[in-house]
Image: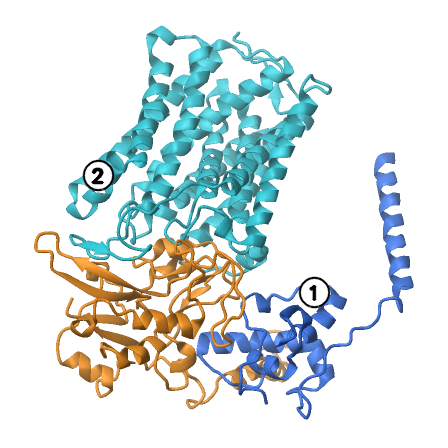
Amino acid sequence: MNGAADPARRDFLARLGGAAATLALAPGLTLMAGPAEAKASGGRRWGLLIDLTRCASGCEGCVKACGEENGWAGAGRPATDAQWIRKVTVKDRKSGASAGLPVLCQHCAEPPCVDVCPTGASFKRADGVVLVDKHICIGCRYCMMACPFGARSFVHEDVTDQKPHAPRGKGTVESCTLCVHRIDKGGQPACVEACAKEGGAMIFGDLNDPQGALGKALARGLAARLRPDLALGQGVLYRGL
Amino acid sequence: MARAAVFAELRAGRPGAVGIGLALGAVVLLGLIAAHAMETEGHVITGMTNRVVWGMPHVFAIFLIVAASGALNVASMASVFGREAYKPLSRLSGVLALALLLGGLAVLVLDLGRPDRLIVAMTHFNFRSIFAWNIFLYTGFVAVVGAYLVIMMSPRWAARVKTAGTVAFLWRLILTTGTGSIFGFLLARPAYDSAILAPLFIALSLVFGQAAFLLVLLGLARFDGRPVGDQLVTRLARLLGLLAAVALYFTALQHLTALYAPARAESARFVLVEGGIYTLLFWGHVLIGGVAPMVLAWHPAYAGRRGPAILAAALALIGGMVQIYVIVIGGQVQPLPLFPGLIVEGGVLDGGVAPYAPSLPEFGLGLGGVALALLGVALAARFLPLLPLRLADD
Amino acid sequence: MRLVAAFGAVAAGLIALVAVLAQAADGRVPLPKPAKATAGTQCVEPAAEMRRNHMVHLEHQRDETLREGIRGKKHSLRDCVSCHAAPDPKAGGQATARPFCDACHAYAAVTIDCFGCHATKPEAGRAR
């Protein structure tokens, strides 16, 4: 009985292995929620289209709305206060012609901030939203060095009275979350909602759905990304750059 | 026919021992107080902002870590390249490397937004991040150099010294490449984003390490009344001068290449011409940290004299700190090129060079790290036989 | 060698002393009395299970919410806060979760990291 393995023993071991695998998978089976519950699925890619021809130069509606929605509106120290979205003016040196645009986390397909994070706190969700897992963020600020758009902020002081849907605290890094707490329930980001009441420059939707509002808007004309030379594949697109 | 070196600890009860120990300890304590204040009040008490996210503590930390790698050079030359003259110096070289690294790491960790999450940093790794790799490289360095030291100091493992030395040598080349690549891999900022930063940092490590080693060796020997020959000092200084030239070469290449590409020329011009204080500091470190050590080490008028050699080392260290400042801070204060070729205006985050002034807590923390490194070497030399009794020229 | 033995004896003595003191302490420190939750509600798990494992549930839930966007499941921290908020003297009498959480955490000497970032006050209209 030395050559072939004892079939009874082999069978027993297989059962044991199967039981172990089932036990290991069992918690996973409850984790794998059905399609109705899993919000961040790989099929969708959330994005924004910002039409700069409708973005008024003095308007800060998106900035104010984001600040109120997520609780970061400043403490009066602009150098260290958080800024998840900001208005920027771009000017031609010779002609003086200028345009205004909101700059926020671009939710890149190849985010440099995700690459450099030592703990993996900076991550990209399956639906393309780039977030900071503040449970494991150690506050090293390397992602802030890495972001070409200056989209991230470091929380320099104690935070109180946080919005329950937007936890934020001292010593961690944060940025635009594309209002995941709203969009996961089928809503729109706060900036888009506020903009709809002013110039209507921002459209939010699924970049992968040609029949959706965003898909149809994109089909009407070429939209550009910031710093296309970096080939980051941002989810935020601008028309009229 | 070299006599075997006799190693001995520093003698007990030397004048000034307690005073120096207490002074260094006090600076370490100040550093801890500064770190505690930063942790409880938040980084708002420092000069760091959302534009300049890495400030003075990082300048100190990177300087110390880069110097640590280069401080091992003397031991490498002895063990790996067979330079007999440096063999008696290997032990101090290894210990200095460890002490400088631990001092730098202490500053780095205490400057984190959440230093209490160090365990998280040691258990969650994103292997696409050069930072994560550096964590392994730094802790591995401690283990590798620790083993190297044990082997060096144990007669029965004398045959293994060359292997251990080679492993340590290669490890520190990779480690310094990793440190330089922290900046070199950043595509976001034109001041970084270059492969040359890795060899530049290796060159800088050799300069800082050699200079630090020379000064620490002379300091400890003088403290304990042990003779060190002029020839040895000037030989170390001449090597320092050569390494300073290599570092200057990489610095020049870094900026020349950037000047050549219109997209990066603005960033190079900022450092070289238009950057105000940063331009001043840049040319300052070129002269003080590069040209002066070369002249002092190699000019015939200074041949064989230890005074100029010591000055060369001191200037190399000062120039080195300034160079790291220009690299780390100067690279961050420049505005991000959202629209290359166009003028960008906005709030604090955009348009124009960012203001930055290092604050007291930042200096406190950084100096605390330096003091920790020096205290570490001093205590090691006191309780371990690191230094040979005689380093006089034969 | 004698030095080592001496150190060992002192260390053993200290450990014994701490053990004796710890025993004697039983009964002198009152057991924690966490604030009562909202009247008429039932916790999502039995109290004994929660006492032992609330941190496991929370840690599991936070990853589901953050990384997969699954919200509103039964171990949501926001819902814990809604039910367990009680008047907090440190917040000027406003209802926060701290009086509930701190009672046991202070007794067990375990620092809570949650409320550095998470809101301690329940949202209006969300209490169960």
Residue A232 horizontal/vertical position (percent)? 27, 63
Q: Is A47 displayed left or right of B14 in the figure?
A: left
Q: Quadrant of residue B149?
A: top right
**Mark 2–mark 1 contact, CB under 8 Å?**
no
| Residue drawn at the location 45% of the way across and 78% of the way down | C68
Mark 2 residue crowding within 10 angstroms, few (<14) / some (14–19) / many (20+) = some
Q: Is A143 displayed left or right of C3 in the figure?
A: left
Mark 1 residue crowding within 10 angstroms, few (<14) / some (14–19) / many (20+) = few
Residue A229 horizontal/vertical position (percent)? 20, 59
Chain with cyan colouring: B
The secondary structure type at the circle numbered 2 is helix
Residue B61 horizontal/vertical position (percent)? 48, 40
Q: Quadrant of residue A153?
A: bottom left
- State the residue lying farthest toward the bottom: C40
Residue, disc 2? B269
The secondary structure type at the circle numbered 1 is loop
Dot 2 falls on which chain? Answer: B
Chain with blue colouring: C
